[in-house]
Image (cartoon, rainbow, N blue to C red):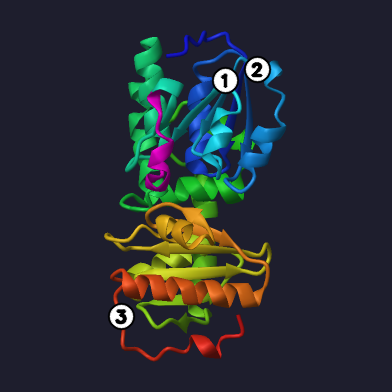
Amino acid sequence: MKQISRNSRILNIHNKNLDGVICSMILEKVYSNITSIETTIYKIDSILLELDYSKYDYVILTDVHPQKQKNLYISEKIILFDHQQTIICYNDPVKMHYVIPNKCSAITVKRFVEKYYGIDFAYMDDFIEIVNDYDLYELLFKESCWLNDLLLFKHSRIEFRERFKDFLIYFTDDERKWLNERSVRVKKAYESLEVYELSINGCVIILNEFINEISTMLLTMNGYNIVIVKNNNNNSCSIRSNYKNIDIGEMLRILKIGDGYQNSAGMLIKNDDEFKKNIELIEQYLTKNGGKYDKRKNISNDCNL
């Protein structure tokens, strides 16, 4: 195992999502000379290939991994903390590449630094439990969605880090007012939504905002098993599900059209033809692998996707 001084020159490359940001905040409590940059799984390979490793003692990847496993071995300085079941083959403790499924990366990062340095970060536990709830998309706590919304839509990254630097879960009057106003807007968007049903118990919607909130409403209030959201603003597609026996991130990886987690995943799309083709592949996969079939009319062909 590598001997990592807390004064080492650390580069933390983390996912831009909630789990990735919290991982970075934990590491900033540990290392005095750390630089953090955020990215996505679609860009991390090129970053690793182009990085000047001489500038850093260690490069720590948190909640983000290269698409090509060989890129983890570009440098001995690379350390990995991730949790996707689909990359369990990346797990290599000898190289300090840790892939621990079924819990967010922040849990693994916290436990690692506690054991490695003898630090007590127990005060972070409640906060990280909320992060885990959102990252695994279990949504047992309303605070997890609130925290995610504040990160993505209200606070800047710098403001969010400063605001929650003590890892305490509470919301100011201003934040609660903003969340309530956002909730009203979400309800209006939901009520005016056009839903295109699939041959399985799922649907497609075209939406540029409130993606997580409305997806959750369709899964819980409308009884769908999977919701596919096409965002015309950035040629992306978000997928949310409540399947217990199907990992939709693994599904997209097998189909070679995207990546993600058990109940939350995504894919990039070049055009409508590619999107329609991907939808067909998803329907075929879910039908074959136990996706529930619903007898409601399939009107997906009526949608100008």
Q: Which residue is mark 3?
A: 293
Question: Do labels 2 and 3 touch, CB within 8 Å?
Answer: no
What amino acid type should be assigned to the residue bearing mark 2? Tyr
Residue 282 shown left or right of residue 151 in the figure: left
Query: In whole angstroms, how far apart are the C-alphas of marks 1 and 2?
Result: 8 Å
The mark nearer the N terminus, 2 or 3, is: 2
> Alpha-carbon neighbours of circle 2 within 10 Å: few (<14), some, or many (≥20)?
some
Q: Residues within 10 Å of mark 1 (few under 14, many from 20)?
A: some
Left or right of 82 on screen, residue 194: right
Residue 156 disc label: none
Element type where label 3 sits in the image: loop
Mark closer to the chain start, 1 or 3: 1
Residue 36, placed above or below residue 57: below
Span of residues in magenta: 83-93
Mark 3 is on which residue type? Answer: Tyr
Helix, strand, or loop for circle 2?
loop
Asked whether the beta carbons under mark 1 and mark 2 sit within 8 Å of each other, the answer is: yes
Instruction: Report whether residue 17 is seen.
Output: yes
Quarter of the image for residue 68 reads top right
Please state which of residues 160 and 227 is positioned toward the viewer in this rendering: 227
Residue 111: x and y, percent? Answer: 35, 24
User: Is residue 288 placed above or below 96 in the rendered structure?
Assistant: below
Residue visible at 38% across and 57% down in the picture = 263
Q: Residue at x 48, y 25 (%)?
A: 26
Which part of the image, by quadrant, shows the N terminus?
top left
Q: CA distance from mark 1 to mark 3?
A: 48 Å
From the image, tell me which residue sits under label 2.
56
Q: Which residue type carries mark 1?
A: Lys
Q: Residues within 10 Å of mark 3 (few under 14, many from 20)?
A: some
Q: Which residue is mark 1?
A: 77
